Image (cartoon, rainbow, N blue to C red):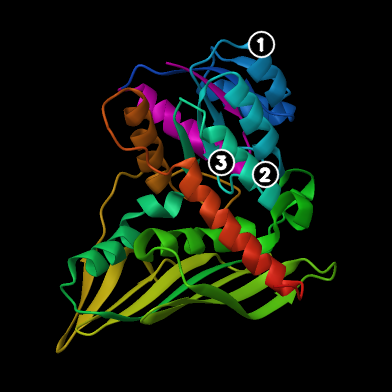
């Protein structure tokens, strides 16, 4: 399988290392890589020395004969690259968010309806063992009814993006479509579509772009709180967490306290549950310290493409609904519902 790879930033380099791991056991080859920055192309070349290098992703798609493409660029480039890859009839992996506007959502869904090749979107939290533990607690019902659930995903300022794209709302969709969308998507994955979503609190950077958001999602018998932030100080340590209160147990995960265990409290007993999963430590300018769930995610998609699995990890249509929910929340912050 010949793979084209577009975007070797912090996230892209993580996925590139994942594909290097997978190439050790599966018949795949990253044959072409694109990034605008010379130093990033040189980094990528060390991982896949035989790959042809490009400065432009659209040029790569136009010139190369490929089976699959990985699109791991800044968010504002996802939609045009997706369109071009679909014109070329390729299997596609695209990082989240798949797009940034309602119009692009509609167009992608329309295009996918007539598309015969697999498309997978990188909603990585769906593959994190510590979050899947929560899903198993809900699905099994062994701790009774879920009564209360909250998510947090908090980070320092995002100063590492190419040409500072994170701080341009038209390019990133703000903290809502870049960071908050992780928990909005996972909430949909485990609970289905909410009846409504309401912004309880938000703050903005000096240019007006939202940097802190608290959302309440309503279900028939449950309200879920989701919070995300890009705080002003870039030294603020990233963490992701959840707390879930059931009739017979309380479950908590907090990556800054203990990233390897989930805390499970039942009547008379509190214990740490070891969370396993494939992992490999890496160095990154982002808050990613290991391949972890990214490797799990990429393995699943490659297995699906090779016919070794019947499950596409996250479909385009599904991921688009998470974008729509994020856009609805972003619209509320601007005073329009």
Place of residue 172 in the rendered image (x, y in percent of width and height, measured from the top left): 70, 52
* Region rendered in magenta: 1-25
Tell me which numbered mark, 3 or 2, is placed earlier along the sequence. 2
Describe residue 326's horizontal placement relative to residue 146 as left or right.
Answer: right
Q: Position of residue 318 (x, y in %)?
A: 46, 49
Badge 3: residue crowd in 10 Å (few <14, some 14–19, many ≥20): some
In primary-sequence order, the first of circles 2 and 1 is: 1
The answer for how far apart the CA atoms under marks 2 and 1 are is 25 Å
The residue positioned 23% from the left and 68% from the top of the image is 137
At x 59%, y 51%, the residue is 286
Q: Position of residue 121 (x, y in %)?
A: 49, 42
Q: Would you say residue 294 is visible in this rendering?
A: yes
Q: Judge whether 52 appears above or below 80 on screen.
A: above
Residue 7 is at least partly visible in this image: no
Q: Which residue is mark 3?
A: 109
Residue 104, disc: 2
Circle number at residue 63: 1
Q: Quadrant of residue 199?
A: bottom right
Q: From the viewer's perspective, is 286 left or right of 316? A: right
Q: Residue 17 placed where, x, y %?
A: 47, 33
Q: CA distance from mark 3 to mark 1?
A: 26 Å
Q: Which mark is residue 82?
A: none
């Amino acid at each position: 399988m010949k793979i084209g790879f577009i975007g070797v930033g912090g996230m892209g380099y993580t996925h590139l290392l994942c594909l290097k791991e997978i190439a050790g056991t599966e018949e795949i080859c990253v044959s072409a890589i694109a990034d605008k920055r010379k130093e990033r192309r040189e980094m990528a070349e060390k991982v896949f020395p035989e790959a042809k290098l490009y400065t432009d992703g659209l040029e790569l798609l136009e010139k190369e004969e490929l089976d699959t493409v990985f699109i791991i660029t800044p968010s504002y480039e996802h939609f045009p690259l997706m369109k071009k890859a679909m014109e070329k009839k390729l299997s596609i992996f695209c990082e989240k968010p798949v797009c940034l506007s309602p119009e692009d959502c509609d167009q992608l869904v329309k295009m996918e309806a007539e598309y015969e090749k697999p498309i997978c979107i990188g909603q990585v939290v769906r593959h994190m063992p510590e979050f899947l533990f929560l899903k198993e607690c809900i699905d099994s019902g062994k701790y009774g009814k879920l009564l209360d659930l909250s998510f947090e995903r908090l980070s320092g300022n995002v100063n590492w993006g190419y040409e500072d794209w994170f701080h341009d709302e038209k390019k990133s969709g703000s903290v809502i479509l870049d960071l908050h969308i992780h928990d909005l998507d996972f909430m949909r994955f485990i609970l289905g579509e909410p009846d409504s979503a309401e912004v309880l609190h938000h703050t903005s950077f000096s240019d007006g772009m939202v940097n802190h958001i608290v959302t309440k999602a309503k279900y028939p018998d449950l309200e879920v709180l989701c919070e995300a932030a890009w705080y002003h100080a870039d030294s603020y340590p990233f963490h992701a967490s959840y707390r879930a209160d059931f009739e017979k147990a309380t479950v908590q995960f907090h990556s800054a306290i203990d990233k390897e265990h989930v805390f499970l409290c039942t009547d008379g007993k509190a214990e740490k549950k070891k969370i396993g999963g494939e992992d490999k430590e890496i160095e990154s300018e982002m808050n990613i310290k290991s391949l972890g769930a990214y490797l799990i995610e990429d393995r699943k998609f490659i297995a699906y493409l090779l016919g070794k699995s019947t499950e596409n990890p996250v479909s385009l249509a599904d991921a688009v609904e998470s974008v729509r929910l994020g856009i609805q929340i972003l619209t509320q912050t601007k005073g329009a519902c």
